[in-house]
Image: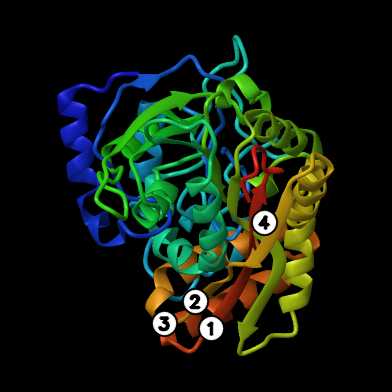
Amino acid sequence: MRESEAEVEAARRTEGAAEPAREAGRGAARTPAATADREASGAGERGGRASTAARSGAAPGSEAGAEGARGTRAAADDAGGCGDAPDDGARGAGASVVAGAGPVGRPGERDTVRLRDGEPEETPRYAPEWLRLREPADAAARAQDLLDPLRIRLANLTGRTGALAVHDLGCGTGSMGRWLAPRLDGAQHWVLHDRDPYLLHFAAVGSPRSAADGSGVTVETRRGDVARLTGDALAGASLVTASALLDVLTREEVVTLVDACAGAGCPALLTLSVAGRVELSPADPLDAEIADAFNAHQRRAGLLGPDAVTVACEAFEARGAAVRVHPSPWRLGPEEAALTEQWLRGWVGAAVEQRPELRDRAERYLRDRLAACAAGVLRAVVHHSDLLALPRPTGGTS
């Protein structure tokens, strides 16, 4: 999908405030180096996740067109900074959550990315504001220790000529590319997959232009459905990446993704999958109960939630890949107050959506937590896991 020059310029203006976050996870904008290809059956980011609160935050793509996404942005502008919760506590939280930070879908609705033939467009679930807000925390959390074995494998790829072909599944606004491309040597061509054309636009506009050694980086975008990802969609891939995606998939969808990666015979770096553990300081007696309800919400309708990394590891290993897993926690303090506020609202909101009987106690809990956040005394560690899968080497590579 080719964007007009006017739209590109508008996106640059809209996302101008995101410049300081370019070295991080998701959220800012990029510069288009290629045109969008709407035919591929790719994936979808920071994928539509109805309860993204669920994850540590947001996830891959949204589920609607540009106009709907713009409406989401407008609504998100009303979300305030960290401070006291509304009098209605957890009820008011939903109205104050930036799209993507908490449950925004219809009750019982699946939140993975969808692009089925004849399926109507839906309201987007992920606003660029949320992705931009969490991008620095994502960048700080991703496991640097997995980069050296990845670099070694990429340097030893057999039969490769030209640029590395990197497929970013559920790219959202492109934070993974902004984080990873400048950390890898050599020319790179990134293929960005997402369900939401609006987010794809931002991803293209904000893509990095150079690799770690100064080599060029180019980009193209593809709109598609992670649930229908095939080996053909990844043909010629040197590397597959995704961020905050695995935990909003079902077992079947994870196996489909793993099969596609195995078919391409390339490494996969899948970061920031929710681990189901949260540490808050100071502690509150309701912490564990909210966390348990949240994790149950993550597993609704067959989604894997905190079990996703284990399932993905087993699937990759069954196909002969060597798998490494490394923790990648968000560490949130006073400097991340705006993110902490949105995460709290979404986290508690998802718990109450899962267990409505928690509502009264959750209202008090959220008020107290937001007050601590505003006072600069709240600390949170939101645990995630990063996974690197290296296929069995061929031709004597290691």
Q: How many marks?
A: 4
Tell me which amino acid carries mark 1: Arg
CB-based contact (under 8 Å), mark 2 and mark 1: yes
Residue plotted at (76% across, 60% down): 295
Which numbered disc covers residue 332? Answer: 2
The first of marks 4 and 3 along the sequence is: 3
Which numbered disc covers residue 350? Answer: 4
- Dividing the picture into quarters, in which one does residue 11 lie? top left
Left or right: 51, with 180 as reference point: right
Residue plotted at (37% across, 31% down): 162
Which numbered disc covers residue 222? Answer: none
Which numbered disc covers residue 379? Answer: 1
Residue with the mark numbered 3: 334
Tell me which amino acid carries mark 4: Ala
Tell me which amino acid carries mark 3: Pro
Residue plotted at (61% across, 70% down): 382
Residue 286 visible in the current orientation:
yes
Foreground mark, 1 or 4, reads 1
- Please state the horizontal and vertical placement of residue 281, each as a whole percent of the image: 60, 87
Q: Residues within 10 Å of mark 3 (few under 14, many from 20)?
A: some
Is 282 rendered above or below residue 120? below
